[in-house]
Image: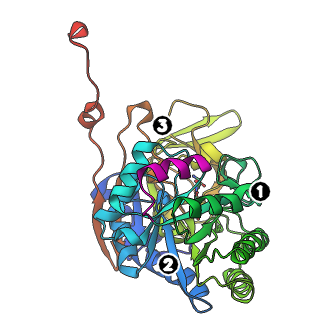
Amino acid sequence: MRNFECVDNELVIGGVKATEIVKRYGSPVYVTDENAVRNNYHRIYQAFSKRMPTRINYACKSNTNLAVLRILEQEGSCIDAVSIGEIEACLRSGFSPDRILYTGVNVSNAELKAVVSKGVPINIDSFSELERLSKITTNHTISFRVNPEVGSGHHDKVITGKRSTKFGIPKHQIIDAYKRAVELGFKPSGIHAHIGSGGQKVEPFIELIDELIKIVQELETIGIDLRFIDIGGGIGIPYRLDEVEMDLDKMAEEITSRIKSKTKVKEIIIEPGRYIIADSTILLATVVDIKETPDKMYAGIDAGFNTLIRPAMYDSYHHVAVANKFGDKAEETYSLGGPICETGDVMAKDRELPKVEEGDIIAVYDAGAYGFTMASNYNMRPLPREVLVKDGEVTLIRESETIEELFRHQRIPSRLML
Ligand code: LLP
């Protein structure tokens, strides 16, 4: 979680007061600080690259805004993409196909064909996908995702690497998958696994690398030498004030030293999404209503789980602050309810805040990852704006939807016409 600057008792991001942003662009609005994205990228790249050749495949599912992708393209990042839509976003942002790795799950033949036609390497998730791909082409760069039977994450719903999840080739079949790929004429270039998302411990990554190394060594004994090991993403961030950041340096040291001493692998790939983008962005919302129930004070805001679903979906904690009373002492306990007609639509529960009034601006922290990308039109509410801030300047990077646009894909059969 970031420490924001406080000027005239107001929260400042990227040199701009939050209140000015809302005055100009309305709310709710996602605000991304360009310098923070660049710094986060460098922090993770450097931790690993000073130890061995490293490729960062930014997991763009966390945030696919084209401006964010442009920034990361300029930094030299590569991409983890999961759909043809994400691939298209990255190609439009200047990434060449060889800087993208497609890791889909339950991939259709239509999507396989589309990915092949874009020339994007494919990280294969199942035997079925391998056989179906071979019918389209065998002249394509591939690797395999294995289910490592090691899982970690901030919530059960985002732990992917445990035995019997839907992801990856089961561990006991992985050697056969490589053998079959070679038999079909492919030259597999690497191995991949993803334990899950948002864990804060180094140990599961070490367990993971030990599993992957065992597989790589077995492959090396049968003449299949891999160029890269991809340890997936999942590096957590401290969402709470009292949490400490994971020891990235320790993680990098433990992992790269093992790879270098035990395998012929030349490159490590990491797929961070959250680590790069989460704390670069705040969501600004306006307090529209105050309600005192018999045992709770609600401040009603104009952003709900249609805008940021993480609290409702995973009970995730996002720190909140009153942006226009940033230096004020906490006085009362509030829950921040959104405009969605479900009881679960509460952005933050029981938080100590300065006295909150209608018109105040609430900053929801660490909203850059899985924020806008998981937003929806539920309750027929248009998607919000996104802006980019850098050194005192604000630029609109996504216009909000209009009410009119909500109807653009609907058709009324002529027999039902007014
Ligand atoms: N690689 C693969 C194969 C993944 O499935 C994911 C995330 C990542 C990398 C990036 O994980 P990260 O570094 O961002 O933790 N909506 C959830 C998170 C779902 C993550 C899905 N896969 C949330 O809001 O916490």
Looking at the image, residue 355 sits to the left or right of residue 281; the answer is right
Element carrying mark 2 = helix
Magenta segment, which residues? 127-140
> From mark 3 to mark 2, how far is it between C-alphas?
35 Å
Element carrying mark 1 = helix
Q: Which residue is drawn at 40% across and 37% down?
A: 377
User: Closer to us: mark 2 or mark 1?
Assistant: 1
Query: Where in the figure is residue 24, as x and y percent of width and height?
Result: 27, 59
User: Closer to us: mark 3 or mark 2?
Assistant: 2
Looking at the image, residue 209 sits to the left or right of residue 23; the answer is right
Q: Can residue 392 be seen in the rendering of this structure?
A: yes
Look at label 1 and name its amino acid. His
Task: Name the residue that disc number 1 marks.
Answer: 172
Look at label 2 and name its amino acid. Tyr
Task: Name the residue that disc number 2 marks.
Answer: 41
> In the picture shown, does residue 72 fall above or below 322?
below
**Frontmost residue, 104 versus 134:** 134
Q: Does the magenta stretch include residue 131?
A: yes
Q: Can residue 330 be seen in the rendering of this structure?
A: no
Q: Is residue 36 magenta?
A: no
Task: Name the residue that disc number 3 marks.
Answer: 339
Q: Residue at x 60, y 66 (%)?
A: 233
Looking at the image, residue 56 sits to the left or right of residue 163; the answer is left
